[in-house]
Amino acid sequence: MLIDDTMLTKFENLGVYLITVFGLLNKLSGFYGLISLDYSNPFVVCVHVYSLLALFIFGFGLYSISKDKYSFIRWFILFYWIDFIISTITTIVFSVQWFVYTDHSLPDLEDSPEEKQQHDDSFKAESIVSIVILCLVRLVHLYFAYVLTCYYVSMSKTHYSKMTAAVDEELNFAGYDEMNEDDDDDLDDDSRPLSGRTRPF
């Protein structure tokens, strides 16, 4: 079954729209983080404030995509890449803080070496699974940024083609008017009376 360009464009718009909605929902964590009233870690507070500000930018991007605002989409794509970099940095910082510098030992298991070893092995296995999931999430975020960039490039080509077609149409229309004026001048010259002319015999 063949898919025409119009249907393909609709699928692209739907995919970009869903990616933006997903990012919008993800940034809601900043709102819930601020209302939790836990301000002991300044870095965490800054991340929540950033997520709250990014929430409005993603909402603006969602509006721009739904209305096909070309210039606004360009700035939104640029911010999406910045958000990817910031999110990757915060993920690394929180991961190192949790898996490296946070003590996960249980004091109740100090008297039971076997249970303590079992707990440590379980934590290592869970840590590996968590790190793999975090890496996959970052890769998905990178893929979303790539999809949005391809969408912007495709929109740029369409926008440029429309501008070129409009300019060509204006030039062709102006050339057509000039040709009509030249034809009218020729007709005026031919329709002049023969006074002052030498009539051939």
Image (cartoon, helix red, strand yellow):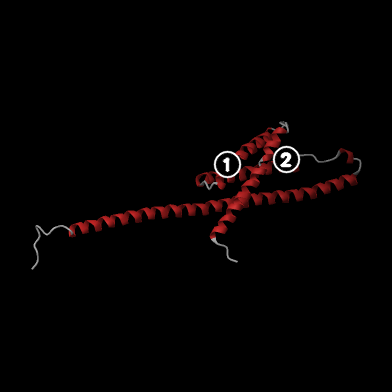
Residue that mark 1 sits on: 60
Q: Residue at x 90, y 44 (%)?
A: 113
Apparent side of residue 98 relative to residue 165 in the rendered image (left or right): right
Give me the C-alpha separation between circle 1 and circle 2.
33 Å
In the displayed structure image, the side of residue 52 where residue 187 appears, left or right = left
Residue 18 coordinates in the image, percent (x, y): 63, 50
> Label 1: few (<14), some or many (≥20) within 10 Å?
some
- Name which of mark 1 and mark 2 comes first in the sequence: 1
Which element carries disc 2, helix, strand or loop? helix
For image coordinates 71% across by 36% down, the residue present is 32
**Residue shown at the point (55%, 62%) measured from the top left:** 4
Residue type at the position of mark 2: Gln
- The residue mark sitting in front, 1 or 2, is 1
Mark 1 is on which residue type? Phe
Nearest the viewer among 126 and 13 is 13
Quadrant where the N terminus lies?
bottom right
The x and y percentages for residue 86 are 62, 42
Q: Is residue 197 above or below residue 53?
A: below
Around disc 2, counting alpha carbons within 10 Å, would you say few (fewer than 14), some (14 to 19), or many (20 or more)?
few
- Residue beneath the point at 51% across and 47% down: 70
Query: Does residue 27 appear to the left or right of 174 in the view shown?
Result: right
Percent coordinates x, y for residue 187 in the rendering = 21, 59
- State the image quarter where residue 23 is shown: top right
Which quarter of the picture shows residue 50? top right
Q: Which mark is residue 97?
A: 2
